[in-house]
Image: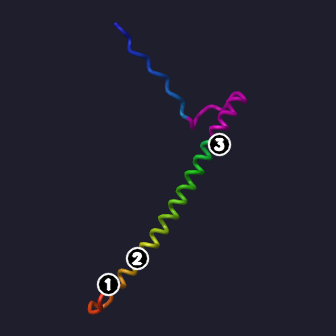
Amino acid sequence: MKRPPTAHPRRPNSVCRRPPRTRTEAAVELVKVEFQRDRLRRGLMELKRRGQLAAEELRTNTRRADQLLSRLAEPEGEPWP
């Protein structure tokens, strides 16, 4: 009778990862942390840009809605251009 394959050991949680034991491990960890930092900075810049675009679109739509409301508030006797 065959035995089922053994499960791979689970990787430890990165939050409680052990401190590097050698300079090489520390250098590798530093590179990983720097890449993650840069990725997060790029993500924040993209979110800021998208937020600015959304705010501009909101202002444009608010102005357009105000214009349409003022047009609808005019008496009906006047012709629309």
Point out which mark residue 64 bears. 2
Residue 77, quarter of the rendered image: bottom left
Q: Are marks 2 and 1 in contact (CB under 8 Å)?
A: no
Which part of the image, by quadrant, shows the C terminus? bottom left
Magenta includes 60?
no
The magenta segment is 14-34
Q: Which residue is mark 1?
A: 72
Q: CA distance from mark 3 to mark 2?
A: 45 Å
Report whether 5 appears left or right of 53.
left
What residue appears at the point 38 percent right and 11 percent down from the top-left corner?
3
Tell me the kind of residue under disc 2: Arg
Give the Cα separation between the discs numbered 3 and 1: 57 Å
Residue 34 on image: x %, y %: 65, 42
Q: Position of residue 29 (x, y in %)?
A: 65, 35
- The local crowd at label 1, few if under 14, some if 14 to 19, many if 20 or more residues have their Cα within 10 Å, is few
Cα separation, mark 2 vs mark 1, equals 12 Å
